[in-house]
Image (cartoon, rainbow, N blue to C red):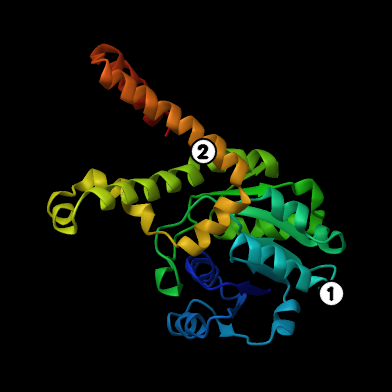
Amino acid sequence: MNIGIIGLGLMGGSLGLALKKLPNKYTIIGYDHNPSHTSDALRLNLVDKISKNFEEIKQCDAIILTIPVDAIIATAQELMEVDSQCTIIDFGSSKEKISNGIPVKIRKNFITAHPMTGTEKFGPTAAIENLYNEKVMVICDVEKSADYQKGIAVSIFKDINSKIIFMGAKEHDRHAAFISHMPHAVAYALAQSVMKQEDPKSILALAGGGFKDMSRIAKSSANMWEDIFRQNRENLIESIDAFNTEMMLCKKLLEEENWDELYQWMNEANKLHDIL
């Protein structure tokens, strides 16, 4: 099976590495507008070959879009002439606008998916062979996809050892706002608040493991996350409001020196790890 991967950063590069473990089943063809990404992908053996011809990518048995959400929607318009058996999979972090934005002509070809994994790093050099191993792969609005394409996508996801779950795109986006997108907003806010109050020498001298853990994802690509925030704006605002409510409660308990209730508030939060 020829698989075209459009976008050779962390997600696309890691996918290439995972699928190249099965050389008798898959041939990986990479495509990226960034020349340094294509040269790095070849050097790092993330793909079998690079194509500079988009028409060649359109002839692949499966096309996987590991690019920002806006680019996914735009690229979908360029895939109108693919074969009826072609499977197109997107890895966008928000799903409803993608699911609703795919042209009707090729909606059956599309599988809208979101791998619940990643790091704060980006580009081909960030690729990790086992990025998808044992990680959840959400498939959204699967009823809009043809059974053949669903079967191909499930087979690919099983080959990279992902845990597959099915969910509506609208439901996914609300959950993703609370579990993924809002924590990124908090990390950016944490980084901004510290940088505006502390000089670099103090940050370097005093920053411990907790601060580094919490602020790590503030190193994530602003280009990618601005796109995600914009696409999932309403849900993100709701999740930020919920977070701010908890922060204001913490502030109130501190102001009132209500240590017993503050303890209970913290102890209740500890229960999250019972779930995780």
* Residue drawn 26% across the image and 21% down it: 254
Position of residue 105 in the picture relative to residue 242 (left or right): right
Q: Quadrant of the C terminus?
A: top left
Task: Say which of marks 2 and 1 sits in front.
Answer: 2
* Real-space Cα separation, disc 2 to disc 1, in angstroms: 37 Å
Of residues 114 and 214, the one nearer the viewer is: 214
| Crowd band around label 2 with a 10 angstrom C-alpha radius: few (<14), some (14–19), many (20+) | some
Is residue 158 positioned above or below 62 on the image? Answer: above
Residue at horizontal 65%, vertical 75%?
A: 4
Q: Is residue 85 above or below residue 184?
A: below
- Judging by the rendered image, the residue that carries numbered circle 2 is 178
Q: Position of residue 18 (x, y in %)?
A: 51, 66
> Is residue 102 rendered to the left or right of residue 139?
right
Locate residue 272, reporting x and y percent: 40, 29
- Residue 81's tag is 1
Which amino acid is tagged 1? Glu
The amino acid type, in three-letter code, at marker 2 is Phe
